[in-house]
Image: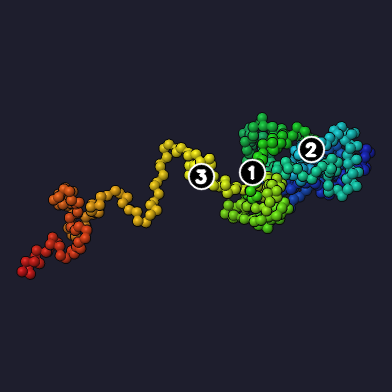
């Protein structure tokens, strides 16, 4: 319902008339050139008339509009469209739980109008860029909020809704349909029932309940018992984070002894001069370290004793010196090579008087002579002495030099001998 400033309505001089909305980066979209439609003095969820903006954040995205006035947005420090916190990108219920505050905004029209006027007066006395009320007096940060905070925009939230006609098989628009042609999620999913008013008041928000359950099950970084460990492992660096950027973050916790970056593994090792500085850095950086929009993984380094323990376990010996039983079915370990250079190299247990074996290799026939079929040719080995090592015909025992021209069995040998006699 559109109204004018000249209408005889209570407190119409306090109606909002803005030139640009208060939005988060996700709702604004990734397209820097967008066209907004400005509607003056409309009544939507907020009970006070305010300027409504409507725009499309990008290609194949649904149109979005502001849902609350800028005064309500500044009171809660939230986006006018998605009603998520502008600093952490989290629902109001999660943020208030992390900061341990309970901001009860009146819900009746008269009390809410009185409360809003007081907040407007407080905003007018400030620079207008900081939250007011209990949120302005809350601590600046929280470990849980830093762990759950979103570091990059989530443009998937701007997608169109699912086409109900396509679900029933009756959509005739095809690719021109502005809605999504996808299978809907489970109707019993609590995320399918979201109320924007409950999100603003911080009650009964299914998204907030899901995030709070995730925060309760997040892993914790335990301090190692070895007091000699003063090194932190930092993973997930990528290719853009440098050594100076790591030092600029970790130097505030204490003196840094060395910084080692392993580019192949995209990780780094930060060694502090004292154990106290390493513990402080681990506490302040675990699941909270964000550099260049990348959330880095911070863990404790391992001591030399732990590495030696792993080596002993690989060899089958525990830290207490107990021998581990081998796993059945696995092949045994090979014997180590002899360390003495003068050790015998008789690996096949051959006798000292046995001659070296000769491979069963026969010479190919001369060109033009056919190979006899199997079973009709001369024997391949001599059988004079059954105890002797057989040698192929046409080959001499090792130690004798064989000259083919002096072989009496070669072709033409008898003819040349008779001819010469």
Q: Earlier in the sequence, mark 3 or mark 2?
A: 2
Please state which of residues 232 and 203 is positioned toward the viewer in this rendering. 232
| The label number, if any, that marks residue 312 in the structure image | 3
Q: CA distance from mark 1 to mark 2?
A: 30 Å
Name the residue rendered at 19%, 60% in the picture.
366
Residue 38 on image: x %, y %: 81, 46
Identify the mark nearer the N-term, 3 or 1: 1
User: What residue lies at 64% left-to-right and 43% top-to-bottom?
Assistant: 225
Q: For residue 144, which quarter of the picture?
A: top right
Who is closer to the viewer here, 358 or 78? 358
Q: Disc 3 to disc 1, how far (Cα)?
A: 20 Å
Q: Is residue 103 left or right of residue 354?
A: right
Above or below: residue 359 compared with residue 15: below
Tag 2 or tag 1, which sits nearer the N-term?
A: 2
Horizontal and vertical percent position of residue 20? 81, 49
Which label belongs to residue 224?
1
Up-down relation of residue 89 to residue 190 (above or below): below
Please name which of the two marks, 1 or 2, marks the residue nearer to the observer: 1
Q: Which residue is mark 2?
A: 100
Relative height, residue 382 to residue 177 (above, below): below
Residue name at image x 21 percent, y 60 percent: 399
Q: In the image, 11: left or right of 59?
A: right
């Amino acid at each position: 319902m559109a109204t004018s400033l000249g209408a005889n309505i209570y407190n119409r001089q306090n109606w909002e008339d803005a030139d640009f909305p208060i939005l988060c980066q996700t709702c604004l979209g990734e397209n820097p050139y967008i066209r907004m439609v400005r509607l003056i003095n409309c009544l939507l969820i907020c009970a006070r008339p305010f300027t409504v903006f409507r725009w499309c954040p990008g290609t194949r995205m649904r149109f979005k509009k502001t849902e609350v006035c800028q005064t309500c947005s500044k009171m809660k420090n939230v986006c006018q469209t998605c009603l998520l916190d502008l600093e952490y990108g989290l629902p109001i219920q999660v943020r208030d739980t992390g900061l341990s505050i309970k901001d009860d905004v009146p819900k009746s029209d008269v009390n809410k109008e009185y409360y809003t006027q007081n907040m407007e007066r407080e905003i007018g006395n400030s620079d207008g860029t900081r939250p007011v009320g209990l949120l302005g007096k809350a601590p600046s940060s929280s470990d849980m909020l830093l762990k759950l905070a979103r570091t990059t925009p989530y443009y998937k939230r701007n997608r169109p809704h699912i086409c109900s006609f396509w679900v029933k098989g009756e959509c005739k628009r095809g690719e021109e349909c502005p809605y999504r042609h996808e299978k809907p999620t489970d109707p019993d999913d609590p995320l399918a029932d979201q109320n924007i008013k409950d999100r603003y008041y911080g009650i009964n928000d299914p998204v907030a309940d899901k995030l709070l359950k995730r925060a309760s099950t997040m892993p914790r970084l335990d301090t190692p018992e070895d007091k000699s460990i003063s090194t932190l492992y930092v993973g997930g660096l990528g290719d853009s984070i440098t050594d100076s950027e790591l030092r600029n973050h970790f130097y505030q916790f204490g003196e840094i002894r060395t910084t080692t970056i392993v580019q192949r593994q995209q990780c780094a090792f930060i060694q502090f001069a004292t154990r106290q500085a390493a513990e402080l850095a681990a506490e302040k950086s675990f699941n909270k370290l964000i550099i260049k929009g990348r959330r880095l993984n911070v863990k404790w380094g391992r001591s030399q004793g732990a590495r030696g323990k792993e080596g002993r376990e690989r060899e089958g010996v525990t830290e207490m010196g107990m021998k581990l039983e081998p796993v059945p079915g696995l092949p045994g370990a090979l014997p180590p090579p002899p360390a003495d250079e003068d050790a015998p190299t008789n690996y096949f247990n051959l006798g000292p008087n046995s001659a070296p074996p000769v491979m069963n290799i026969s010479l190919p026939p001369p060109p033009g002579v056919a190979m006899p079929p199997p079973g009709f040719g001369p024997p391949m080995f001599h059988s004079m002495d059954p105890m002797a090592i057989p040698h192929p015909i046409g080959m001499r025992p090792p130690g004798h030099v064989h000259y083919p021209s002096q072989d009496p069995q070669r072709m033409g040998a008898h003819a040349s001998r008779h001819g010469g006699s």
